[in-house]
Image: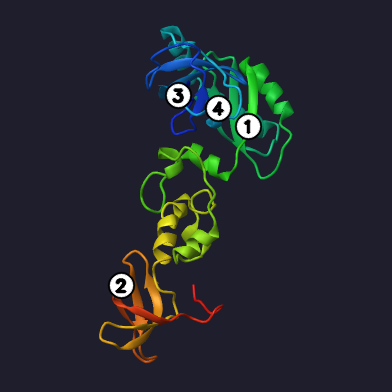
Amino acid sequence: QIVGVRFKPVTKVYYFDPNSIDELDVDTRVIVETARGQELGIVAQPNHDVPASEIKSKLKKVVRRATPLDLLQAQEYRSQEGEALKKADEMAKELKVPIKVLSADYSYDGSRLIVSFSAEQRVDFRDLAKQLARSLETRIELKQVGARDETKILDGYGRCGRRLCCSSWLTEFHPVSIRMAKNQSLPLAPSEISGLCGRLLCCLAYENEQYTDIKNHLPQVGSRVKMADGKLGVIRGLNVLKESVLVGFDAEEPPIEVDAQTVEVVEKPAKGKRKR
């Protein structure tokens, strides 16, 4: 039996051993044991059974339900994170450490402060960590994050006009490839298929499987086809979302768009000459 816990909104859910604590409902605040020590988390999945195959290592335990004092402590330290962020940024500039400080997150009891930053390369931040620990009187952990995580932290709005997926609901990043853009006949200009992070848009993956499935049932571009009236033509293009094809009859005439089911393939394009 497990309970699913996350530590911040829109982040990965981790499995924990409920430790014989029953009825840990969704949104219950709990104190759990982690590799970094005790943390305050929120239940995202209540007590339930999962197959043993889903458990990759020994589960850490839920220590207890969070008390009102735990929550007050957490709120107090959360109110200090802005000042800690400012201090970390100022100190990094003073020590000339080439990083961009992104966030500062206290543990619920103030025993640890995690400072997330981005940098163009690996940097030596030991002096910065020591001086921050001395100034803020707590244990400091500096964590370098990539471009996608940086954008998730900073938040923003995409070209669609909506809040970024990574900040609003996407809990994990999945592989995205240029092949997905090609599969959906999207323009391959970086400015058209890149997000605020400078990486390929996460949404390229959302409909890719659907495009692949539909294309597998459509005639290939270059195929010779017979129309319902018996006229012969050649497939010049596809409209995947409408499941229609563009059929050309004469080089001097523009192709016409018809439902893919109304044409019959009489000859597929020669191997190696299929157009994408």
Instruction: Evaluate if marks 4 and 3 touch, with contact meaning CB atoms under 8 Å apart.
Output: no
- Tag 4 residue: 104
Above or below — where is 198 with respect to 235?
A: above
Residue 125, position as x, y percentages in the image: 71, 31
Three-letter code, disc 3: Asp
Question: What kind of element bears circle 2?
Answer: helix
Q: Which mark is residue 143?
A: 1
C-alpha gap between disc 3 and disc 1 = 34 Å
94, 107: nearer the viewer: 107
The residue shown at (37%, 53%) is 160
Camera-nearest label, 4 or 3: 3
N-terminal-most mark, 3 or 2: 3
Q: Residues within 10 Å of mark 3 (few under 14, many from 20)?
A: few
N-terminal-most mark, 2 or 4: 4
Three-letter code, disc 2: Gln
Q: Which image quadrant for residue 33?
A: top right
Q: Which mark is residue 261?
A: 2
Above or below — where is 134 with respect to 266?
A: above
Camera-nearest label, 3 or 1: 3
N-terminal-most mark, 4 or 1: 4
Three-letter code, disc 1: Lys
- Tag 3 residue: 49
Instruction: Evaluate if marks 2 and 4 touch, with contact meaning CB atoms under 8 Å apart.
Output: no
Above or below — where is 6 with respect to 148?
A: above
Camera-nearest label, 1 or 2: 2
C-alpha gap between disc 2 and disc 4 = 58 Å
Q: Which mark is residue 229?
A: none
N-terminal-most mark, 4 or 3: 3
